Amino acid sequence: MIDQYLRDRAALAGVVVLVDVRRGPESLEASLIQYLQEIREPAIPYLFVATKVDKLPAAQLKPRLDALRKTTPGRIIGFSAKTGLGREELWKQLLEAIPASNRQKACL
């Protein structure tokens, strides 16, 4: 069911891939990215969101995000649902991904 949606949904502006900041992308996420790049032309854009950043001590967070950025294709945003860290950056990226003609509909 998801395959058909990803292939045929013309309005799909991108995919957000959630990864635990402590583990990073695993084989399932890597397979998903490869799939998104192959199923249609142009490839479906994606954004990695490293969740649970509140679980790491402050001294470990920046080095961990930097390491993820070096080893992960595409953009990574650190995010915490608990503290709200990264919320504004995530919203900014999501809104930029939506074509201007569809933004008002998407924000309703």
Image (cartoon, helix red, strand yellow):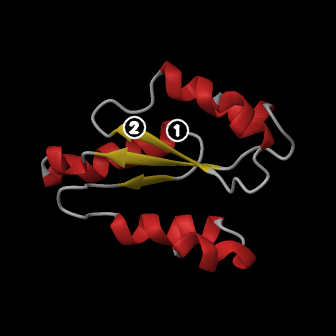
Taking depth in this image into account, of 94 and 67 the one nearest to the observer is: 94
Q: What amino acid type should be assigned to the residue bearing mark 1?
A: Thr
Q: Residues within 10 Å of mark 2 (few under 14, many from 20)?
A: some
- Neighbourhood count class around disc 1 (C-alpha, 10 Å): few under 14, some 14–19, many 20 upward: some
In the picture of the structure, the residue carrying the numbered disc 1 is 72
Residue at 83 percent of width and 38 percent of height: 40
Say which residue appears at 71% left-offset and 78% top-offset.
100
Residue type at tag 2: Val
x, y (%) of residue 33? 63, 33
Question: What secondary structure is found at the residue carrying circle 1?
Answer: loop
Numbered tag placed on residue 15 in the rendering? none
- Which picture quadrant has residue 43? top right
Asked where in the image residue 77 lies, by quadrant, the reply is: bottom left
Which mark sits nearer the N-terminus, 2 or 1? 2
Horizontal and vertical percent position of residue 104: 61, 80
- 4 sits left or right of 77 in the view: right
* Most distant residue in the right direction: 41
Give the side of residue 52 with respect to residue 30, left or right. left
- Between 59 and 2, the residue placed more toward the observer is 2
Q: Quadrant of residue 38?
A: top right
- Count every numbered label the image shows and give the total: 2
Q: CA distance from mark 2 to mark 1?
A: 11 Å
**Rendering coords of residue 59 (x, y %):** 16, 51
The N terminus sits in image quarter:
top right
Assess whether mark 1 and mark 2 are in contact (beta carbons under 8 angstroms): no
- Residue marked by disc 2: 19
Mark nearer the viewer, 2 or 1: 2
Residue 56 shows in this picture: no
Label 2 secondary element: strand
Percent coordinates x, y for residue 10 in the rendering: 79, 52
